[in-house]
Image (tube, rainbow, N blue to C red):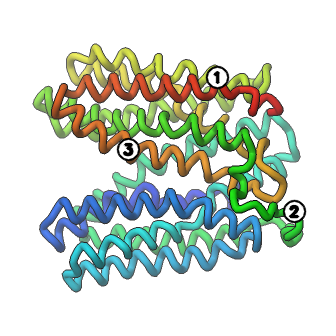
Amino acid sequence: MTPLLAASLLTRLPIGVNGLATILFLRDRTGSYAVAGAAAGALALGAGLGAPIGARLVDRFGPRALAALAVAHAGGLIGLLALGYANASAPALLPAALVTGIALPPTSSVMRALYPRLTGGDSALVQSAFALDSVLTETVFIAGPLLTALLVATIAPAAALVLSAAAVAGGVVAFLAALPPAEEPDAEAVAPSRLGALRAPGIQTLVLSMLPVGFAFGALEVGIPAFATDRGRPELAGVLIAIWSVGSVAGGLVYGARTRRTSLALVHLRVALVLPLGFVPLIIGGTPVTMALLVIPAGIFIAPLIATRNELAGRVAPPGSTTEALTWPLTALVGGVSLGAAAAGGLVEAGGWRAAVVAAVAAAGVGAIVALARRGTLTAA
């Protein structure tokens, strides 16, 4: 499984590189943070919207659909470079970024759908696999920006986008080569419903609960830098967010190492209920050192929440729609992050950084309430 996991990790590198690299490249070319930020936002929005579409293609045609998506995404990134060097305007850049994001291959969802098979159905190993998967995703969000910064400092912003294109193309080739033999997908097993995986009540619950959780994450991604700026240390914003991610990694490792003694649905519900409590202490953050300590427990339950969510999505997915089912909660999370970041900007200007943190606590609480109210849709897991 190691070659397959390594290839999967390589294909995820763009999610940690594309946003920052796009902003830095287009800011350099256009001189406008507004255009650069809008393009990066369109790229992220496209990735969120396109994940279920790409996954449905995989469920219908098999993993070979990943190759076509990888070519389209890599080509789109190169196209953005060409448009940037041609001094294209926003009306040309934004649609190109959106389409490029839509084409991002859902390799991580394909990998998650394989975990039960690769682990022989052993529940303990499946739990550890999903926990490791969430940890690896966090490392991408840590390593991606650092790698981008290195390339920007030593070569140019464009180099990071070239690296991202090469990673997704090469990673998918390696992933397909390492895939275990599998039967062709049964077209009759794929439900004709236009809703696809969304017709399952359990998937609906995960989507409805992860949207406000994503809002909370987006609000904190604005609130934490606002805190650093308020304390006169804006350069510490990235450090604090990185420490927050380290807390998530630690939580994921602990979760994966522990034996689950109750149902997966109950574990997920408990983590969802505790998550907002971990955000509350951030409100009393005083000095940067204090905040650095507080963001660790604030991150502890993130990876376990993502791990249990992903495992649940695979269990409650309709027949023939497993890969698609794994993408919908992520799409909801990404959409929530975008909404939370946008709303938090206004909250910070109106009430300071604590207003964004309070909004994050409230939003995560709403996600927990939704999960609690609809827990019956997940009890089969």
Return the mark for residue 189. 2
Residue 121, how many percent across, how many down? Answer: 87, 43
Q: Is residue 273 left or right of residue 112?
A: left
Return the mark for residue 372. 1
Q: Is residue 188 left or right of residue 113?
A: right
Mark yes or no: residue 355 visible: yes
Q: Is residue 363 left or right of residue 376?
A: left
Query: Disc 1 marks which amino acid?
Result: Leu
Q: Residue at x 23, y 69 (%)?
A: 26
The answer to whether marks 2 and 3 mark residues whose Cβ atoms lie closer than 8 Å is: no
Residue 100, how many percent across, how many down? Answer: 45, 72
Mark yes or no: residue 129 visible: no
Give the distance between the C-alpha atoms of the residues marked 2 and 3, in whole angstroms.
Answer: 35 Å
Q: Sequence order check: which comes first, mark 3 or mark 1?
A: 3
Query: Disc 3 marks which amino acid?
Result: Leu
Query: Disc 2 marks which amino acid?
Result: Ala
Q: Residue at x 81, y 47 (%)?
A: 116
Residue sitting nearer the eye, 369 or 117 = 369
- Label 1: which secondary element: helix
